[in-house]
Image: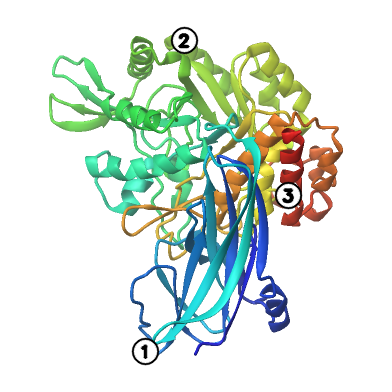
Amino acid sequence: MMHFQAGIVHEGYKAYWGENHWLEQDINEFCSAQEIRMTCARQDFAAAQVCIYPKEGGTLTIGGAAAFSPYGARGGLRLDVQMDGFAPFMQHIGYMADDLGVERADILLADETVELQAGRAQMVWLEIPVPADAKPGEYSGTVRIYEHFMFGAETPAAELHFTVCVKDVLLPEKPTFYLDLWQHNSNIARKHEVPLWSDAHFAIMERYVATLGELGQRAVTVIASEIPWSGQNAYLTVNYISDMYEYSMIRVTRGADGAFSYDYSIMQRYIDLCAKYGIADEIEVFGLCNIWVTEEKGFGACSDYPDGIRVRYLDESDGCYKFMDNKADICGYIRALHDYFVSTGQIKRVRVVADEPADVVKHRERIDLLKANGPQFQYKTAVNHIEFIEEFQDDILDLAPVLPFAAKEIETLQNVRSKKGGRVTWYVCCSPKFPNTFLASPLCESRLIGLLTWYLQLDGFLRWNYTVWPERPREQISYRSGIWSAGDTNFVYPSYGGDVLLTLRYKILKRGIGDYELARMADLSPEDALWDSILKEKQIVKFYDEDWIGNPDRDSGNPARCYVRDYAAYDALKEALLEKIEK
């Protein structure tokens, strides 16, 4: 029979394996937990992790299929979960290596069976969806562990127990939290090996859109010119060549008479697909403003227009593809896209997005040209240069400053929002180092996103990274180490079968969005003493150096002095909010 230990712990644990792998005494303590209690609302979910710590190799299955080890004659374990009233499910949690080679639990696998490695913990995600019509009360469940060797009969080996306490609080079906995760659909086509914008591509994109809808995503990403980020400058990374180009959704043709025509069907099909999953508040358009250029590397502008807009078209006079190379043609392209959104009744939802503009003078020229050619366009900007908040507050409806600037300029941002009626969200990317959603980040930092948004009285959260995978994401997610930390590029992974593989970071971000809704429903003020349970530093700007400028090396302080990193504190805060709302 197999020798192993088993325990059940909270959802926010992130197992790791590497130089500082678990010691035997840590495992003994970890696996001593044989039961757990979880509290949640209706239209919510409860979750925990099952830990299996094997002393020898074997198999672990969460399904009913036969499972044998490719290593030969080995024992096997099977998990089975039972619970009255709900439909719990389990998924194996896979490890991914961070920038230092430490393997960290992250990916929720589709496999029913995984191979156990002696001395390496295998974590299993246990989730209990709680529907809107669930009756408040306590519900008990059991995880049973069975063991067998080869063709021998299974025998019961252990039991773990859990209780879900459902409060009489209903989370909204659609979160009020404004989530804006940018979509990189060309990368989805590459990783799933289907033709770009084909029916096969749309079928796979729909699976990703569904997972975004499940999180409460609000914005549709439209790419309106070729490679607006210049492939994230990936050509500068020569030790792990990765294709990150994002291609236009708009097809352009120039007839023999010299007139341009525009086919918006791909773009509109994607907008309609997102609406099917409730993603319909905003159409964010990339490729019209602040194009990333690197002239010396060949990634410059293709025209006399003062931005690097790259519009590719088929010239029917000679059958050649070309790029617009003059200001008049590009202005005509902008006018035509603007008029399409006006004629289809979508213009009020459109935001022309600039990603981290750095030159005030150039940006003013670009904005003025866009206004002249698209008078009903409205604008959104991700800001990592603080002067842009003041300079462009009358031009830009929606602002998304990086967190240190959001905290520093919170009064200005709230005044801008009050005056113009736009949204103010915040973001993190490759910096600051904390709080963030990197592979090495504690999961409480993903959860903190929702609570910080409410504490700062902002509308939501933006991140660039849903599917910006490097070349072999299931083998090596670490990419451009020292600039991007492992996990910076993604919240999900591509399945070899065409599905989406979620992560612990995805799940805990969803948990944090739920926390935001509870704080809103409880009308939790920034002065409430409940914040003391998670925030050690109430002035968020003090998380960072005074001269923070977006350089990852500048925010190398100690996050432990800023906020609590014990996940139990966040569970306790949630329970307190639920009780406050119930009363």
What amino acid is found at the position of numbered circle 3 in the picture? Answer: Tyr
Who is closer to the viewer here, 541 or 68?
Answer: 68
Number of other residues with Cα within 10 Å of mark 2, as a class: few under 14, some 14 to 19, many 20 or more: some
Distance Cα–Cα, label 2 vs label 3: 44 Å
Distance Cα–Cα, label 3 vs label 1: 44 Å
Total residue callouts: 3
Q: Is residue 477 visible?
A: no
Asked if residue 451 lies left or right of residue 281, the reply is: right
What amino acid is found at the position of numbered circle 2 in the picture? Answer: Gln
Q: How is the image coloured?
A: rainbow
Secondary structure under the numbered disc 1 in the rendered image = loop
CB-based contact (under 8 Å), mark 3 and mark 1: no
Who is closer to the viewer here, 47 or 138?
Answer: 138
Above or below, comparing residue 214 to residue 266 in the picture: below
Q: Which residue is mark 2?
A: 376
In percent of width and height, residue 286 lies at 44, 29
In percent of width and height, residue 581 lies at 73, 34
Q: Quadrant of the C terminus?
A: top right
Q: Which residue is mark 1?
A: 72
Q: Residue 391 appears in which quarter of the rendering?
A: top right
